[in-house]
Structure formats: C-alpha cells, structure tokens
C-alpha cells in the first residue's frame, strides 16, 4: 500500500479561504479516487497560511483491471449465412480491440468481452492532481504574473511524492520537487522530504505545525497557560480561534499590557477592539476585564519586546479613537439620536430605520398586550433600540450595535430594564448564542425580527439556496428560539399579518412567510425529534403557539400505540377525498354506529396531550366494532354519507393531535 503527498506552497492565503480549500480538497480527492476505483484508507488535508497539503494513505499501486461487456450489432448482421464475420462484425471487433474468439452472441446480439487494464497510480496522479488542485474555488481569485490561470495567491512551490518517489506535476508555472520550506524564520529554509509519512513531523522540526486542529489546540493551551500565570481567564470565540489558527504556522503566546485608563470604556467595546479588530485574547480576572491581553505571534525566538511595543501602540491608537467617539457620543442623551434614524435606510422601498422603529413600537404594544405584561419599558426599549446606529462609535464598530446602545442608555439615565432590552433585542446573535432573558428584549426582539422577515418577503427578496437577504433565516430562528426559551404563548401568524399591513409596500405573502417560519421551526427541532412527527404535528398551525406545538411533538414522539395508529390510518384511507357533512343520528342503523358516535363526542380537546392520547386510545374498541359490524359504503346514499361524516368527525379528533397519516 502506498502513501501520496501533495503540498502546494503559496504566499499568505486569506484566512477565510483556507477552511473552504480544506473541504474542497478533501471532497475532490475522495471523488477522484472513488470514480477511478482506486482503493485508499484515508485522506488528510492540512493547511497553514503558506501551504495546502494532502496526504492519501493506503493507496493501491494501480487501479484494478475492469471487465466490460460491449453490445454490438444484431447477430444476423454481424455474421453471414456461413457463420463468418461480416464487415460489420469485423468492424465491431476492430473498434474494441478484440479478436473473433472474444466475440459471442447473446439475446440475438453480438457481444464482446474486453478487459480494461488497470492504470498505474503514479501515472493517474500525475495526470489528474494539477487539475484537481486548480478546481479550488474562492473569493477574489486573480491572475498572478504572466499566468492565465487564477488562484487566491501566487504559488511559490509544490511537492508531489508517492512513497519515496517524485510524481512530476506542474501547477500553474511551478514544477514539483521534493523540497518544501519551513517557517519564514526557521534556520533551514529548504526541507527535503523523502517519504510522505515523515511530512508532519519533518515540518514540525522546521517550526510549522501543519495540522490545523493541532494548531488550534496549541493556541488554546498557550492562551490558558499564559492567563493562568496572571490568575486570569482568556476570552475567545470560535471565530477568533479559527482566524488565529489560519494566520499562524507556529503560534507563540505573548502577553501585552495597555493603560488601565481604557478600562473605563464599556467592556464590550474594549473586548471587541481586541478580539475582532486586532485578534487579541482579552483577559478576565475575578469576572472583570484586566488591562492585559494575549497576542498569538507567528514568530521563532525569545525576544518579544518589539512585538509587545508594536501591539501596545496599535491597541492604544484604537482605544484612543474609542475614547474620543464615546466622549463625543455621550454629550447628548441616547433619545436625541432617534431623529437621525430618518437618514438611515432600512432597505430599499421599506423606509428608514426611523420608520422601522415606529413599526416596532406599534407591534411591540400588540405583543405586550397579548402577553398581558406592562408595556411602559417595552415601548421605551422599542423607541431607543436602534438609536445607537447613528452614533460615531457604532459607525466605527458596527459589531457593537445594541451593546453601545445599552451603555449609552445607562449614561442617559434610562431604566436598567430598558438598557438590557436594547442590548438583548438583537439576541440570539448566532445559532448557538443566548436568547433574551428580559421581557423587554424578548418582545422588541421578536417584533424586530418579524418586521425584517416580512419586509424582505414583501420586497420579493425571499431567501434562496445562495442568498439570505438581511439574514432572514437567522431572524426566523431567533424568533423561534426566543419564544421557546422564554416559554412565551403567542401567535406568530397574527403578528406577521400586522407587520405586513404596516409596511410601505403592500404584498399578500402571509402564507409564504408562515410556511417559511414553519420550515425553519421543523429544521430547528429535527435534531431532537423525528421529521415525520414534526410534519405530522404541523397539521394544526404550529405558529399559533410554538410552545404548545412542541408539547404535542413530545407526546407523539413517545407514543407506542400500534392499534390506534392502524385505526387512524384506516379512517384516513376510507374518507380520503370524500365530502364530510354533519352527522345525523336518524340515519344510524347499527348499534356500532351509535356507540362510536357517543364515544367520539365524549372526547373533548385537552392541553394535557398525554391524557388526550389516552382518550384517543380508549376509542379503539368502538372503532374496531364499527369496522367489524358496519359496511361504510352502504347502498343507501344517506346512510353511506352519514357514516363517512361519522368517520370524518373521528378523524377530527385524531387531527387535534397530529396527522396520523404521516406517522
């Protein structure tokens, strides 16, 4: 079994492209090997800012010989009356490279059995690897130098080795060799690779950690180790970790310090400047931000003074700007910024952010009334929630919208609940983050997200597979998560209608939006529940009360009543596509009809769905007796229609819980 290594060295790649390249290379090599029927054990793709590498383990030395049957002309055309090949038969044999001995007749047609010899793996790799690599796609690909081919960055070298032998290839204008390159500051610039199996360790010795997962764990450990020396804890997100992982080849943690004066700024602001803008790890001690941070350097050596000085200068300049903007912004109260929202467009045709704010106030008032909660702080939150969009600080640091609004609201003397609501109405910020805890943030956040979804659909810009205008998928999921986490009882369908009526562009798309929300709900819950059950329980509009919908889903998920399921489906099959009328007792003929009618009428709607399920199950004896004693399709039309209506009434009892036909 063989091992193959491809390493392509480049100038520094954009960090956002690297994860895409890893995935594309993995899928590309896998598809190539499978389509060529080449057996392999594993494929590993490694990446740093300066290289993309593929290691394929357990390769066969050649592809297997393949037997192929080729169908030719009809027998009487292929052979003459003496059993000799005709010109057509000879042509078929010649075309497929076989002799007359390899031909045979089956089902009155001439056939040839040919053997396609397996191809040497070295040849196969040499012919296909360059095109495989050049299939990589990403943003802002361009031509470099005098080359016609496009790539993310100029290619500097490439290594192509099968076991201990070079596989000569050319990618753009670079011929392959067995020479790679270590870290920029490594003592040995050239690294000769004799065996693919040595690649990872050989690069490690030359200060390159090629395994991105290992590199990430090193970054986490070094950040925690340095923080622990200070009695602190490092702050980082997955986004920050990924970015630092893909901008370093050999990460080293360096602790830097800035003036404690900057700690007077809002904590979210300082952390954002460090994490988002400078890729620093902020440090917290005893739950409070301290004036030290960790930067991950891509450096070999022990002299970090210049690095520290450079990073401190940069962070000071950024925080000085933040101090200036903060001081300028807080010269007037947050409420004074609301009027300026008239100059900020929400989206084309849908008015300004001021118009959106007025819609949020109106919709929030309706929601608060339906929830039977005091609306004073909710309406104040709705009025101020977008005001910080016109401040200098949010203009400079857009990631801080809401957080800055909350801090400015505190400075302006607003109630604490309003301040939290301004911040929380943007929650959840992503699929995993927390949802709003306070009713102010919950109500205004739901109103805001519903308004956004409705505006996008009304503008005819609903999401597609490749686009998601204004993040409406995330907005819909935010509404769903907020309602479920807060155990709120509300009718989304109602608020969609209200939101659509309030928009400057009128378009009847309520049903479309309802279906969009339902599908987001089903996708969100499908990790926990069976999709068939989710769809079955969606028979009754789940948006009328999402919390209630989940209770029904939980009940049906735990259901183990085969007889009930069988009876329900039999009812569904019988009355399918039939007109259901009112039941008239005067047309009852059999006792089984009367007994079933009485039993069905006794089943009344219950919010305790487990108890309701037991009531449905208790109908089984009456249902089975009905089917045993009664012929539904009676010759008398009145009797037949009445029996169908009785089963329709029964189906309605089943439908209250779920569409049993989907279970």
Image (cartoon, helix red, strand yellow):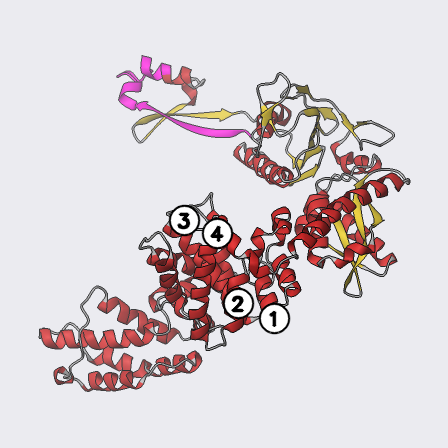
Can you tell which mark lies on residue 428? none
Mark 3 and mark 4: Cα distance apart in space: 25 Å
Question: Which numbered disc, 1 or 3, marks the residue that appears first in the sequence?
Answer: 1
Question: Is there a contact, CB below 8 Å, between mark 3 and mark 4?
Answer: no
Front label number (2 vs 4): 4
Report which residue position mark 3 lands on: 462
- The tag earlier along the polypeptide, 2 or 4, is 4
Position of 250 with respect to 351 (left or right) is: right
Q: Nearer the viewer, residue 615 or 240?
A: 240
SS of the residue under disc 1: loop
Q: Nearer the viewer, residue 334 or 187?
A: 334
Q: Earlier in the sequence, mark 2 or mark 1?
A: 2
Residue 237, can we see it? no
Segment colored magenta: 64-91
Residue 348 visible to an observer of this rendering:
yes
Which quadrant would the C terminus be assigned to in this image? bottom left
Residue indicated by mark 2 = 380
Q: Which callout, 3 or 4, points at the residue further toward the start of the chain?
A: 4
Around disc 3, counting alpha carbons within 10 Å, would you say few (fewer than 14), some (14 to 19), or many (20 or more)?
many
Quadrant in the picture for the N terminus:
top right
**Residue for badge 4:** 342
In this rendering, the label closer to the viewer, 3 or 4: 4
| Whether label 2 touches label 3, CB < 8 Å | no
Judged left or right of residue 418, residue 547 is left
Name the residue carrying label 1.
Answer: 415
Looking at marks 2 and 3 on the same chain, the residue that comes earlier in the sequence is marked by 2
Would residue 52 be found to the left or right of residue 500 on screen? right
């Amino acid at each position: 079994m063989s091992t193959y290594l491809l390493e392509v060295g480049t100038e520094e790649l954009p960090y956002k492209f690297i994860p895409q390249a890893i995935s594309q290379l993995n899928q590309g090599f896998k598809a190539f090997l499978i389509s060529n029927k080449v057996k392999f054990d594993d494929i590993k793709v490694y990446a740093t800012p300066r290289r993309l590498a593929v290691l394929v383990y357990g390769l066969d030395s050649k592809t297997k010989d393949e037997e192929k049957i080729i169908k030719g002309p009809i027998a009487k055309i292929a052979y003459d009356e003496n059993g000799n090949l005709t010109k057509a038969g000879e042509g078929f044999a010649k075309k497929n490279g076989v002799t007359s001995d390899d031909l045979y007749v089956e089902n009155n047609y001439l056939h040839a059995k040919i053997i396609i010899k397996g191809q040497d793996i070295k040849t196969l790799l040499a012919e296909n690897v360059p095109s495989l690599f050049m299939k990589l796609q990403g943003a802002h690909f361009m031509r470099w130098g005098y080359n016609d081919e496009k790539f993310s960055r100029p290619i500097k070298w490439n290594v192509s080795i099968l076991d201990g032998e070079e596989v000569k290839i050319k990618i753009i204008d670079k011929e392959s060799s067995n020479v790679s390159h270590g870290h920029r500051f490594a003592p040995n610039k050239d690294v000769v690779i004799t065996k693919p199996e040595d690649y990872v360790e050989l690069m490690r010795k030359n200060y390159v950690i090629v395994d991105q997962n290992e590199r990430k764990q090193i970054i986490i450990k070094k950040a925690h180790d340095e923080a622990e020396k200070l009695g602190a804890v490092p702050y980082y997100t997955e986004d920050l970790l990924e970015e630092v992982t893909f901008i370093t080849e050999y990460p080293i943690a360096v602790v830097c310090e800035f003036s404690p004066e900057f700690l007077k700024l809002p904590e979210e602001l300082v952390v954002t400047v460090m994490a988002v803008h400078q890729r620093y790890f902020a440090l917290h001690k005893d739950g409070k931000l301290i004036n030290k941070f960790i930067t991950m350097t891509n450096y070999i050596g022990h002299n970090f003074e210049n690095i520290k000085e450079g990073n401190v200068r940069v962070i000071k300049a950024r925080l000085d700007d933040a101090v200036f903007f903060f001081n300028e912004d807080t010269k007037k109260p947050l409420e004074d910024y609301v009027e300026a929202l008239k100059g900020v467009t929400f989206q084309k045709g849908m008015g300004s952010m001021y118009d959106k704010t007025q819609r949020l106030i109106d919709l929030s008032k309706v929601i608060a009334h339906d929830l039977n909660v005091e609306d004073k702080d909710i309406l104040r939150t709705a009025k101020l929630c977008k005001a910080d969009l016109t401040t200098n600080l949010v203009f400079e640091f857009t990631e801080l919208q809401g957080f800055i609004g909350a801090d400015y609201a505190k400075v302006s003397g607003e109630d604490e609940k309003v301040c939290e609501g301004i911040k929380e109405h943007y929650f959840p910020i992503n699929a995993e983050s927390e949802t709003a805890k306070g009713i102010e943030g919950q109500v205004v956040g739901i109103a805001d997200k519903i308004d956004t979804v409705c505006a996008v659909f009304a503008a005819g810009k609903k999401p597609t597979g490749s686009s998601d205008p204004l993040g409406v998928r995330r907005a819909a999921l935010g509404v769903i998560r907020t309602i479920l986490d807060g155990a709120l009882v509300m009718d989304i369908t109602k608020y969609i209608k209200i939101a659509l009526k309030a928009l400057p562009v009128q378009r009847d798309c309520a049903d479309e939006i309802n279906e969009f929300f339902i599908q987001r709900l089903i996708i969100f819950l499908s990790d926990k529940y069976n999709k068939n059950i989710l769809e079955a329980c969606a028979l009754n509009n789940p948006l009328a009360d999402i919390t209630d919908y989940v209770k029904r889903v939980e009940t049906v998920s735990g259901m183990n009543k085969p007889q009930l399921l069988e009876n329900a489906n039999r009812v569904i099959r019988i009355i399918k596509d039939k007109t259901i009328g009112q039941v008239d007792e005067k047309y009852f003929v059999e006792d089984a009809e009367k007994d079933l009618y009485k039993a069905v009428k006794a089943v009344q709607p219950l919010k305790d769905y487990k108890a309701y399920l037991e009531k449905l199950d208790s109908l089984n004896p009456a249902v089975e007796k009905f089917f045993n004693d009664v012929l539904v399709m009676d010759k008398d039309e009145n009797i037949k229609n009445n029996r169908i209506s009785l089963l329709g009434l029964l189906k309605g009892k089943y439908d209250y819980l779920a569409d049993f036909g989907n279970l």
